[in-house]
Amino acid sequence: MTATETKTTTTNGRTDGANGVHQIGRSVPRIDALDKVTGRAQYTADLHLPGTCYGAFLRSPHAHARVVSIDTSEAERMPGVVAVISAASIARDLAIVVEEEMHAARRVLSLFPNVGGKVTYHGQKIAAVAAATKELAEEACERIKVEYEVLPPVIDVREAVKEGAPLVHDETKPVDGLDHGPFAAPTLFNIAGQNHRNEGDVDAGFREADRIFEDTYVIPRAHQTYIEPQSTVADVARDGSVTVWTSTQGHFAVRSNLANSLRIPLSKINVIGMTIGGGFGAKFGGIVDTYCVLLAQKARRPVKIIYTREEEFLDAKPAPGAVITVKTGVKEDGTITARQAWALWDTGVGSGGCYATNRVKGVYKIEHFKVDAYDVHTNKPAPGAYRAPGAPQATFAGETQLNRICAAMGWDPVEFRLKNMREGDQIAFKETLQAVADRAGWAKRQSKTGPNEGWGVAVGEWTNGAGPASAVVSVHEDGKVHVFYGLMDLTGTDTAMAQIAAEVLGVRYEDVTVSRGDTNSAPFGTASGGSVVTFSFGNAVKRAAEDAKKRLLELAADHLEVAVEDLELANGRVSVKGNDESLVTVAQLGQMALRSKGGPIVGHGSFASEPSATTTAAQIVKVSFDPDTGQVRLRKLYGSLDVGKALNPMACEGQMEGGLVQGFAWGLMEQMRYAEDGRNWNPGLLDYRVPTTLDFPDIESVMVEMPTKNGPFGVKGIGEPPIAPGVACLVSAVADATGVWINEVPLTPERVLHAIKANGKK
Amino acid sequence: MRDFEYLAPRSIGEAVALLQQHGAKARCLAGGTDLVLMMTDKIATPAYVIDIKHIPELNVFEWDPTGGLTIGAAVPFRILERSDVVQRHYPGMAESAGEVGSWQIRNLATPGGNLCTASPSAEIAPILWALDAQVTIAGPNGSRRIPVQQFVTGVRRTALEPEELLVDIRVPPPGERAGSHYIKLKERQKMDIAFVGVAAAVELEPGDGVIREAKIALGAVAPTPIRVPKAEATLRGQRLTDERLEEAGREAADAAKPITDVRASAEYRKEMVHVLTKRAIRQAVAIATQH
Ligand SMILES: Cc1cc2nc3c(=O)[nH]c(=O)nc-3n(C[C@H](O)[C@H](O)[C@H](O)COP(=O)(O)OP(=O)(O)OC[C@H]3O[C@@H](n4cnc5c(N)ncnc54)[C@H](O)[C@@H]3O)c2cc1C
């Protein structure tokens, strides 16, 4: 389904020596494929330590309530129950252990609500129990008696900011409001964070415009719905040192979280990252691991906690919902003169979202741009990252409105974008959009459109992050190469790293093995999120392999009695340039090294952080809808992405398709719902709908390669961007089909039918 | 899940004896696709689980042109869905069976279990209502047969006594020129629950387009599946016209008493009953016309 469209021929940073047989750019199968399909891969739930007991939580049935009393005595007395923890028990235990470290202690104390304190969302943890069996632990939780004084909840951000709204956190101070925009007011309440950005002068920009458009977009919370739920096993040794086996995107991140929140010295914690069954931003720790360690400390036995799917929905870290108003000024000639956005992000009892509002600007030349955005507390769990955090929400607003502008002003949405897109060094916005438009046959789409069908296009942007990474690459006596590091493989990155090592060392991908160390053994590595991995670890592995290569060449130079410069490394051997007879194999060098002065061949590579370049994901969809029922179907899907350099095209395609599906699913059916009383209304996969393969047509993916200078071989991080455009793309296609702009998602059949009728289109 | 004892009787007599012995502490197990989830969620906590899949009578799947179709209570949906007989004589039933869950689910789940769970959205119910199916029930006093419409008495309630079990479902043979159709309204293509289910079964007079008999049943819009006698009367003895269809659709919508819940509003469901009833009738008539 994929074709790689190489737009540029420079292969930045390409190493010599591979002699035509490149190990990068090959769609090799995943290094862990066999383990996964045969069930050999070890997930946290597969771990059975002797003496393990099982953890369970008692959760608040109310969205907002004061805790009047908690009585754990009956649960504690139950045979088979080995530990019960709650705010009171932690306070007691802490009083005995430490009195000096009050700051750290406060963090531990905040893990559960105190008597007299509040629960602030449905499903919040009140207490935890470890018992001989999971059933017993659950039963013990049911025997914990809690009295509540129920308080009115606030669930809609537009209500939450108003004076008189219930305060989610009693201590949240009111903030000065705005004198403009959709939620203008002298004072705003329940504000968890703010982001104000001002480029140029939007008022002047709007004065220049011939037409001004203003729309408000509403998108609900979405859950990442990784297949494997949050899960941890913890064990505490006699000396207090802690071992944690967990499903995480970053075992070093888990280690530091635990150290900080439980005031355990870093050196006394070892985190073992198990095979992970999906994370998408929600597995950086803190949801179960902290509690699991606390229970294990008290139980003095290993404790295992595996979340249920219901717990996932009640109490994990879903993506925040948002209400975003966008105002855009456009000239008759199609120039965008100004853009302004106001946003309220539904960040529940936490924060984190409002900065993403800046993405409303998109990849366009816009001189005057202004954002006023807020994180707003509601009685819902705190949000987390979801693939490209905040991008689908902001892109929904920005890109849907661009399409509405095009429809209103008679512009072709692709042409309009090409006209307004920024250009620059290492970026390929226009090429990427053009590539998908060509693949979809955009220009001729009218001839392929039946009644009740429509087309949509949208573009998302993202720049990968970078973080500290390190790796060790060894060459063994059999000529095989081993990569060792502290990287959590979520998406097939071990495979890409093996390809990089193979490419540098002139061996085949199949001759490279990879292993991940725990936090005690591996050198530090940043967590797998923010599309950092291939960029950062890729550099570390490349440097480590180059370091090993240097040793190989030195050994060979010694052995063949020529200068290093006269040697080349390829196909598992080092030979003298221009003399095929004079050679030594990598295996022989691996053996010689053992007897050499320098010892075994081990290369080290470290990377700190360097900037990357922005990439774009462009998508096109054709939809159809049923005018009598409102049901929308996806008929054709096309995606393009500037990947910088595709180390493994098949893996890139996997990322492109996965992200695209998640984006469209959010627009089509995914939504976390909260009832009037603030309770989670659909805490399960029956009523939180994620699509199945039958809901999607085949996806055609086109890769564009515009290398970035700092990425290994020109790589850009690509895990996140494909989720960004989907919602906007879908909504625009449905508008094209129905003639109605539906500014709230998901597009459930009922919502679509209602909108069509309200607009007199039927 | 609580611990339980697994029992596998080999005859109806043995099964009834076990049910008598253990009373409310026992539950029958067919495919387990409802029961096991109920046990995991502790909605059901049986001490004895009686697997009915080893009883010969419950595995019967037989067609006979005069007696009709017998579907043993242990026969899974996938057999129905793929059966030539069902596809030919009861196309609406094949549709309905094929709408349940996924292949994996349909290889386990049974129409019998679907009826016994008696959920308002039970997939197989509307078509069985429309086809005037009957069910055979066995108990300490032998067996009895009742119309399926009397089997489901409320949300998750059936006519089964604690010591009784469902033996089979009997569907009368269709007339000469018959057709049936089932439509499930859902958000996902598969693996979804019915927001509304509509079944229509019709029979045409020989040689022309006059509707001799029409039966319409709705699922997920009332505590139990319902028939719509008024709409049936509107069609009976008539040719299918747009006006008749519209009237029947409206009557079906009027008969529906849906609720608003997390899946859809009552208004939307009512409206969809209208739309889908028309579609189901039209399709059932189209199939009948081919005979
Ligand atoms: C993923 C998934 C998807 C699903 N999709 C659908 C769907 O699309 N549509 C739908 O309607 N349902 C669906 N279901 C629900 C379920 O599969 C059906 O209701 C199924 O028909 C139940 O049949 P079973 O054989 O598995 O019953 P079981 O779970 O074995 O039994 C169900 C109930 O009936 C009782 N019982 C079973 N047999 C007898 C008997 N012979 N005599 C007396 N009592 C008996 C049991 O004690 C139990 O109370 C789905 C379930 C799952 C898990």
Image: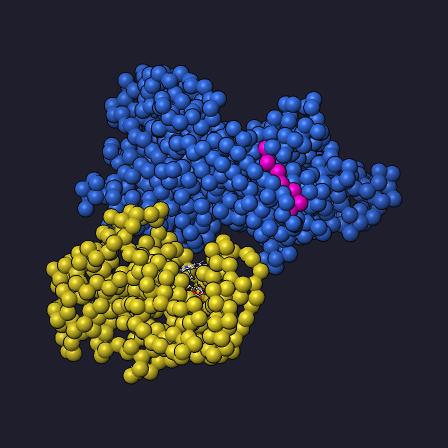
Chain colours: A blue, B yellow
In the rendered image, the vertical position of residue A384 relative to residue A681, given as above or below: above
Specify the quadrant of the image occupied by residue B218: bottom left
Drawn side of residue A609 relative to residue B287, left or right: right
In the rendered image, the vertical position of residue B57 relative to residue B252, given as above or below: below
For image coordinates 40% across by 37% down, the residue present is: A678
Residue A169 shows in this picture = yes
Q: Position of residue B181 (x, y in %)?
A: 27, 66
Q: Where is residue A263 in the image (x, y as percent from the top left)?
A: 67, 29
> Start and end of the magenta stretch?
A81-87
In this rendering, the count of numbered labels is: 0
Name the one closer to the observer, A465 or A193: A193
Q: Position of residue A683 (x, y in %)?
A: 45, 46
Drawn side of residue A133 relative to residue B211, left or right: right
Name the one closer to the observer, B163 or A474: B163
Q: Is the magenta stretch mostly helix, strand or loop?
A: strand
Ligand 1's quadrant: bottom left
Specify the quadrant of the image occupied by residue A291: top right
For image coordinates 60% across by 50% down, the residue present is: A136
Q: Position of residue B270 (x, y in %)?
A: 24, 52
For image coordinates 50% across by 32% down, the residue present is: A68
* Residue A83 inside the magenta-drawn segment: yes
* Residue B102 inside the magenta-drawn segment: no
For image coordinates 27% across by 52% down, the residue present is: B258
Name the one closer to the observer, A741 or A133: A133
In the rendered image, the vertical position of residue A34 relative to residue A112, given as above or below: below
Residue A336 shows in this picture = no
